[in-house]
Image (cartoon, grey):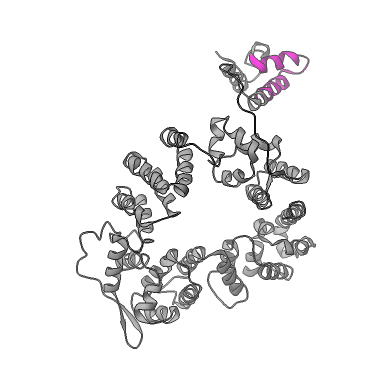
Amino acid sequence: MNDLDALTRLAFLGTAHAPEPDSLGGVEGQTARALSALSVEKRVLLAAGARGVARAAGGRLSQLGPPGEAAPPDTLEVCPPRVSALLVEVMAAADAEMLRAILERMAHVRRRLPPELLPRLLGFKGPMREAIVPVLGERGQWLARLHPEWRSARTGTGTSPEEAERVWAEGTFEERRTMLEQTRLTEPARARAWLQGTFAQEKSDHRVRFLSSLKQGLSPEDEALLELGRKDRAAGVREVARELLSRLPTSAFARRMEERARAVLHWEAPGTIRVRFPAKWDAEAERDGLDKPPAGIGQSEHWLQRLLSALPLSTWENAFGATPEQLVAAAGRSEDGIGVSVGWAHAMHLGASPAWASALFDFWARQNPKVLPPERAENLASTLFEALPPPERAGHTLRVFRGAQALPPLERALALTPAPWPEELARAWLSALRQQHDATPRALALLGVLSRSALILPAACLAAAAEPIDLPAPLSYWQRELHRFQTSVSLCRTLHEELKP
């Protein structure tokens, strides 16, 4: 039995039934024998800790080779000691949002991680790596090349064509995806050829993510590859392909969908939009998404969503010579007003419009609950809200905050407005928070963003946020969250003081 199994067996069976730890080998055995004066239980725990430290420190070399090249000198200035201490504190607390905020701030002011934190940060996987790469510095990039699990944290700068081909052919999925996206930026034809060559052999979830990477730098040359996705056997792949093809106005898919949509929507005086579907769709309709609706959605609404989401909203302004407010009102006079409005909301991915968003928010807010249940209206508004650019979201949130707009609900509007908030919204939120005296829906909505508000407040508002906030007895449940918020505000103030542009 090997040393790992021996220590595991000792931990599972308990020291009363398992052999003495003196029988262990390796660094844990050395630790156990050196601590013979302690109780058996303490020796086992410390032996396990010693093995953990040894594994974190490194592994045994399988063979001794010639020394590699030394790390190049760093060109970025290292972050200040107080920021380094903040990083350690935040990692210990497992606060991913604060960690990302610190890393992004460091990247903004061109600072790098201190050498002693590189192994810990390089060990992070997933989306956090995007924030880590810009602050690695040359030493971090050099170190990432030495460990297989760290290589995907490299930026790819200077990667040779041979190495790029090797990674695409032999790398993990994340390494291949990263290499595909990097190559797409500089050699789109090469990246396209890679994906076309392996597309049929990739797993369906991999095809979805690989195809999604074409969104950046999308061009008519990608149409043939996207057509493979449109005809794919997996629904998720077809969905991504159709969404990207709709972004190419000259694609055959976009032209087909525009022709169908124009034949379905009709303007009738004095201002009503009527919907008339053909008796039968053409042969490509089902592959284009005009298929059976998912559960809970009617056939007409499903088709309208598919058709209208594939066309820019300006199509209807030009076709009918009307403003967004007039168009939404005209659609509302028909039996299919909800379906048309939802289709137009989905078209926001082709180009967001504040005027269209306001018209749709107001339309959904006015609907009879029997026609559009409030819960669905709120969900539609939230989905549309997320499609808006951050500055426009903040503007709508301020309107909701002041009662000038009913949807989305204040709680969702605040939660979905990304950092950094504009100063006007941030100061309004802080002022309103100090005026709450009871557990009203408005008070709960304001308090509901405490967990992230320290990160979304602009630097100009941090001093005001640090001032004491007294919550009355009906809101005492939020006292602990308020304390965490003000602790985070203190961290953010330190961050802005130490990392000035």
Residue at image position (40%, 45%) is 191
- The one nearer the camera, 24 or 266, is 266
Residue 153 left/right relative to 337: right
Q: Tell me the quarter of the image containing the C terminus.
A: bottom right
Apparent side of residue 114 relative to residue 236 in the rendered image (left or right)? right
- Closer to us: 450 or 489: 489
User: Residue 113: x and y, percent?
Assistant: 68, 41
Q: Is residue 199 magenta?
A: no
Give the residue at x 71% y 23%.
Answer: 46
State whether residue 10 appears in this view.
yes
State the image coordinates of residue 250 (x, y, percent, origin top left): 33, 63
Query: Considering only vertical position in the picture, is 52 above or below 188?
Result: above
Residue situated furthest top in the rendering: 23
Image spot of residue 495 (x, y percent):
74, 52
Q: Quadrant of the N terminus?
A: top right
Residue at 75% over, 43% down: 85
Q: Is residue 280 left or right of residue 181?
A: left
Indicate whether residue 50 is drawn in magenta. yes
Q: Which residue does the image show at 51% across and 63% down from the upper left?
A: 386
- Is residue 440 at all visible to an observer of this figure? no
Q: Which residues are magenta?
A: 26-52
Q: Main secondary structure of the magenta part?
A: helix
Residue 266, percent from left and from top:
30, 78
Quarter-wise, where is residue 296 in the image?
Answer: bottom left
